[in-house]
Amino acid sequence: MIYLLVTIHVIVCFFLIIVVLLQSGKAADLAGAFGGMGSQTAFGPRGAATVLSKATTVAAILFMISSIGLSIYATRRGGGGGGSSVLDAEKTPKPAPGKASPAPAAPVSVPASGGQPVNIQVQPEGGGAVKVQVPGPGQNVPPPVAPPAPAGKK
């Protein structure tokens, strides 16, 4: 079905291009070359509809119908199989060129402390050492403490 619709759309496109290029402009006569319109209408004199103008109208209608049909088909199909949006393919972040991806975190073994909290020193990349207190087995984890509000802001 999609192949038939795309084929019709391409044929209508080429036909519309040819028909539009074959038409002469509204001011193609000798008076149009010197700026005369021959009439006081806004868009020039309205002549009888020629075969080319009728063919242009029909081709434009077919072009619009085939375009709407292709967009409906693409929406129902799911946008080509990869996702419904171009942005769906960009959800996974890609590492910047020239930078190595961060090494996966190594498992940390906590020494048995008999239920007492354990102090662990962590060395992040590019920063100083940070001491972290890890609760021992059987201890409740304290709730996180919110940072103090900046002074002067209400």
Image (tube, rainbow, N blue to C red):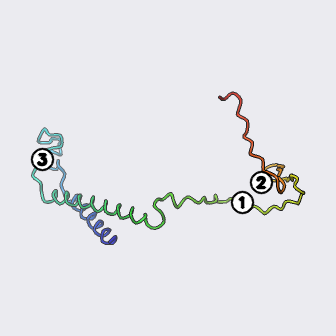
The front one of 17 and 141 is 141
Which badge, 2 or 3, is on the more N-terminal residue? 3
- Image x and y of residue 145, in percent: 75, 42
Give left or right: position of 105 versus 25: right
The residue carrying mark 2 is: 125
Q: CA distance from mark 1 to mark 2?
A: 9 Å
The amino acid beneath tag 3 is Arg
The residue carrying mark 3 is: 46
Give left or right: position of 24 versus 90: left
- Image x and y of residue 132, in percent: 82, 50
Q: Look at the picture and state if 24 lies above or below 76.
A: above
Quadrant of the snapshot with the N terminus = bottom left
The amino acid beneath tag 2 is Glu
Q: CA distance from mark 2 to mark 3?
A: 76 Å
Q: Residues within 10 Å of mark 3 (few under 14, many from 20)?
A: few
Residue extending farthest to the front is 138
- Image x and y of residue 140, in percent: 79, 51
Which badge, 3 or 1, is on the more N-terminal residue? 3
- Image x and y of residue 65, in percent: 27, 60
Q: Residue at x 15, y 44 (%)?
A: 44
The amino acid beneath tag 1 is Pro
Q: Residues within 10 Å of mark 2 (few under 14, many from 20)?
A: few
Quadrant of res 54? bottom left
Quadrant of res 21? bottom left
The residue carrying mark 1 is: 102
- Mark 1 near mark 2, Cβ–Cβ under 8 Å? yes
Quadrant of the snapshot with the C terminus = top right
Q: Residue at x 24, y 64 (%)?
A: 15
